[in-house]
Amino acid sequence: MKLLKTLILLLVIIALQSCNLVPLKPGIWKDDKIDEGKRKDFHTLNDLLLKNIKAGDQDAAENMLSKDLLGKSGYKRTLELIGNRMKEGSYNLIEEYYMVNNVKDNTFKNPNTNSLDLDYAAVAKEMYIAFLILKEPENKFMITLVYGKFDYGWKIDKLELEKYTENGKGTAALYKQAQAQYAKGYLIDAANSMAMAHDCGTPSEELKSLFTNDMHVFYQNLVTDLNRRYKYPLAIAGVTTQPRIFRIDNQNVKGGTYPAVCYLTSFDLRDTVAIKKENEQVKKVIGNVLPGIDKDKKYMLYYVYHQKPNMTSNAYSYDITVKLQ
C-alpha cells in the first residue's frame, strides 16, 4: 500500500513537472482558470495528503512536505489536529490558486482576483495554494495547503488549520449579529459574538485578516460598556440562595458554540438535588440579569462551582446544559 501511494505521488509530480516545457509568464490563476490538467494533478495531491493524514500514515504525509517544513517542530501537531478534525467528516475545496512569481521571497498581493484577499509570501517561482473547509456542520475549520515547486519536486511548504465559522457564521456575519444584539441591549451576547468573530478572523496566514479595523473599534467600545455595566462577582438577583456569577464566556461543544455562565453556589457540589433546584431558579431570572443570554440560541451552559477556580487550585464544577430551542 505504501509503495502504491509513493508511486501515485511520483507520477503526479512527474506530470506537473512535464507541464513546464516552455517559459512561464508571471501571473496568478484561480479555480477554473488554472490549466485543467495541472489542476487535476493538484487535486490528486490534495486528496492523497488528506487521505494519508486521516489514515494516520505520518510517513506518507511527511513524504509530501518540503525540507523546510520538515525542519520545523510544529508541523507534526498540525498533522495531528487535521487528522482529529477529519474524523468528523470530509472536506470541500472552496478556492485554489496557481501562481508564477517574479521574485522569490516577495509578497504578492492581487486585489483583482475576486478572492478571499490573497496575501502570501512567495517560497518558489511556481506555487499552488488550496483552501479547504472541513464539513463540520456549524463550527468549520479551514485547511490551508501551500505548495512550492522546488528542485526536488512539488512539495507542501506550509500547512495550516484555523477556525473559519462558528455556529455556521463567518467573521462578517458574526459582526453583523453582534451589532444587532448591541442595538437590543444584549451586551453579553454581542461580546460573545465578537469573540467568535475574532476567533474566525484569521482562517489562514495566506489571507488578509477578515477582522477589520472597524470591528476592532466596535469590540473595544463594547468591552468598555460591559465593564461599566457589570461588576464581578455578579449576584443573580431573584434567587434566594444568592449564587454569584464570576465569568461568562463561549464554550465549544459538538454542534456549535454557546454561552457558558459560571457561578458560585453555597451548596456542596455533591448535593445535586439542591444544585439542580437552585439552577431552576437561576434559569427563570437569568434573562433579567443578563438580557438576551437565553434568547435566539439552541443551548446555553451553566458551570456551577463551590470554589472559584484559579491557577493553583483544581476546582470542580457541576455542569448543566439547557436546551433553549
Image (spheres, grey):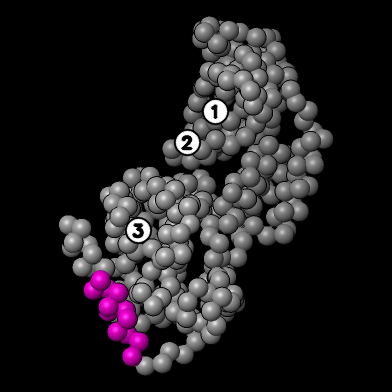
Which residue corresponds to the image point at 43% horizontal and 73% vertical from the top-left? 148
- Look at the image and say whether residue 133 sits in the magenta stretch: no
Which residue corresponds to the image point at 44% horizontal and 40% vertical from the top-left? 255
Cα distance, mark 3 to mark 2? Answer: 31 Å
What residue does disc 1 label? Answer: 301
Quick check: can you spot residue 136? no
- Look at the image and say whether residue 16 sits in the magenta stretch: yes
Label annotation for residue 62: 3
**Residue 257, placed above or below residue 93:** above
What residue does disc 2 label? Answer: 253
| Label 1 residue SS | strand
Segment tinted magenta in the rendering: 10-21
Cα distance, mark 1 to mark 3? Answer: 41 Å
The reply, left or right, for residue 197 in relation to residue 41 is right
Which amino acid does the dot numbered 2 rest on?
A: Val
> Nearer the observer, disc 3 or disc 2?
3
- Mark 3, Cα crowd under 10 Å, few <14 / some 14-19 / many 20+, is many
